[in-house]
Image (tube, helix red, strand yellow):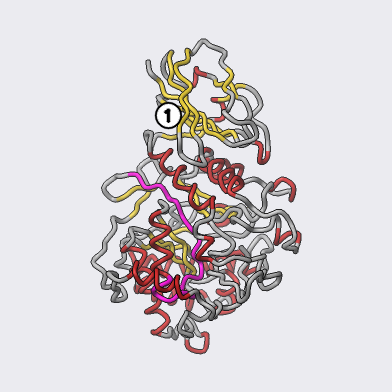
């Protein structure tokens, strides 16, 4: 998502909605960061492929882009967090802001000077962090976007490190906070590659300042532009705990001569040293296809099926989780009048109330992916397209497979209902239980027992729809 200036929230707010969320919120109180909620800190798992809690319990990153949630008053924020928690999300990504204003009109910095923080604004960020934690949601904070660092610091690495230490110190004790050192870091160079050595030094200085505050107790990554991964410039940096990519706002990336997210995941999965990887910003639901490339909002919009293809394709390729986003929700858009649609350059086609869009199909279906992955052994999951016999295809039609390292189970994601055959030699045993998992509903249709020697063709229950073939060894 290219950082754009959207219109401020409409003052026309539905009275009934406000009444409803007051009922939801009547027992919730927040005193900035003095919440008693303490989530277990996240760490990189011993095999370096996943994240887990400090006690070793698995953590599936199911993120949502709540970039500009500071636009919402506490009641509306409470409604947002309540909904996302109910929908199975585990984390939200929040941009701390630079020149924007919070719901009360407070700006982040006095005279836009980042070493002169405006305390009322940062109390809003404090409340956001506390509210998220109260709903068992982790928060990945983005201090600034790439071009904002350029505006704020130029190439002054020392000032940037001081800033990193200040903001890191403010949240160093929050066990549910992670850091995305910059949003779209290459925006500092107008998205031209490569970024310069001086620009890279600036981001490393921010990361150094953050680390000096939290002393390694909070995980860190950095968010790139389209369509690339943080590994391009920062994979070898010791502060980078996991790689993040942005696959971009396109249905079929190959139509734009760009790699699909599963290709970027595969590339980072193969890198040394081993680090976890995920897609931190794919196609947003209800976004016009290729909006930033084609410079028009008058193209087909992303539906729930596109959300599922991006999510399952990434996770089955080795990602430790996935981030979802909605075009109306990331900036918390509220139409000023019925039928309003935001056109470029102000925004990429926002057209619905964020309150309604919280309930979009794709958002409500993401939990099924999380539950599916958590239903089997977690830390030994590996990507393995060799589980398939035949051509897995390319682009958005690519069939993806994953399994346990020991072969006790395997899964195959078919994006358009393609029949598949499985190489059972990649799994353990001679007899297997097979079923179809519906990513729309989370329901299961049992196929039955199959033998390893059978040349069985698995045909999904409905042609043209995505399904997951699930195979468990039964001996």
As drawn, is 144 to the left or to the right of 168? right
Q: Nearer the viewer, residue 308 or 387?
A: 308
Give the position of the C terminus as an image quadrant. top left
Circle 1 sits on which residue? Answer: 405
Q: Nearer the viewer, residue 215 or 391?
A: 391
Q: Give residue 81's position: percent from left, percent from top.
A: 40, 63
Establish if 90 lies above or below 98: above
Q: Which quarter of the picture shows residue 294? A: bottom right
Establish if 131 lies above or below 40: below
Q: Nearer the viewer, residue 245 or 10?
A: 10
Establish if 315 lies above or below 411: below
The residue that appears at 41% across and 66% down in the rendered structure is 79
Label 1 packing within 10 angstroms: few (<14), some (14-19), many (20+): some
Q: Secondary structure at mark 1?
A: loop
Q: Is residue 453 inside the magenta stretch?
A: no
Give the position of the N terminus as an image quadrant. bottom right
Q: Give residue 428's position: percent from left, percent from top.
A: 42, 19
Q: Give residue 128's position: percent from left, percent from top.
A: 39, 70
Q: Is residue 75 inside the magenta stretch?
A: yes
Q: How many marks?
A: 1
Magenta residues, start to end: 58-76
The residue that appears at 59% across and 19% down in the rendered structure is 457
């Amino acid at each position: 998502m290219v950082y754009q200036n959207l219109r401020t929230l409409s003052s026309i707010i539905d009275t009934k909605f406000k009444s409803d969320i007051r009922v939801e919120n009547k027992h919730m109180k927040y005193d900035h960061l003095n919440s008693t909620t303490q989530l277990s800190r996240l760490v990189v798992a011993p095999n370096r492929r996943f994240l887990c809690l400090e006690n070793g319990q698995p953590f599936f990153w199911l993120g949502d882009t709540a970039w500009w949630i500071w636009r919402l008053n506490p009641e509306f924020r409470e409604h947002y967090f309540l909904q996302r928690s109910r929908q199975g999300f585990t984390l939200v990504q929040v941009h701390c802001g630079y020149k924007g204003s919070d719901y009360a009109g407070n700006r982040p910095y006095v005279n836009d000077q980042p070493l002169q923080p405006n305390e009322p604004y940062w109390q809003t960020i404090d409340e956001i962090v506390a509210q998220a934690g109260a709903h068992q949601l982790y928060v990945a904070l983005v201090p600034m976007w790439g071009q904002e660092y350029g505006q704020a610091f130029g190439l002054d690495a020392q000032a940037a490190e001081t800033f990193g230490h200040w903001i890191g110190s403010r949240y160093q004790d929050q066990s549910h906070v992670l850091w995305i050192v910059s949003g779209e870091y290459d925006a500092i160079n107008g998205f031209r590659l490569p970024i310069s050595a001086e620009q890279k030094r600036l981001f490393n200085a921010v990361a150094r300042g953050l680390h000096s505050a939290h002393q390694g107790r909070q995980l860190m990554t950095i968010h790139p532009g389209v369509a690339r991964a943080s590994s391009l410039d920062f994979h070898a940096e010791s502060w980078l705990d996991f790689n993040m990519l942005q696959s971009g706002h396109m249905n079929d990336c190959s139509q734009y001569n760009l790699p699909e997210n599963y290709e970027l995941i595969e590339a980072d999965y193969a890198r040394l040293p081993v680090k976890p990887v995920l897609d931190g910003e794919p196609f947003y639901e209800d976004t016009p296809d290729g909006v930033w490339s084609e410079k028009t909002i008058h193209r087909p919009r992303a539906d729930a099926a596109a959300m599922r293809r991006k999510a399952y394709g990434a996770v089955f390729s080795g990602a430790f989780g996935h981030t979802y986003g909605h075009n109306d929700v990331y900036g918390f858009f509220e139409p000023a009048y019925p039928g309003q649609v935001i056109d470029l350059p102000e925004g990429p086609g926002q057209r619905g109330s964020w309150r309604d869009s919280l309930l979009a199909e794709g958002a409500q279906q993401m939990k099924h992916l999380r539950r599916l992955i958590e239903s089997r052994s977690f830390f030994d999951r590996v990507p393995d397209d060799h589980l398939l016999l035949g051509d897995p295809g390319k682009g958005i039609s690519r069939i993806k497979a994953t399994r346990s390292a020991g072969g006790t189970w395997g899964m195959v994601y078919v994006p358009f209902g393609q029949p598949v055959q499985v190489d059972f030699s990649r799994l353990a045993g001679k007899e297997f239980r097979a079923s179809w998992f519906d990513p729309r509903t989370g329901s299961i249709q049992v196929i039955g027992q199959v033998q390893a020697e059978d040349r069985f063709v698995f045909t999904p229950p409905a042609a043209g729809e995505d399904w997951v073939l699930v195979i468990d060894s039964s001996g």
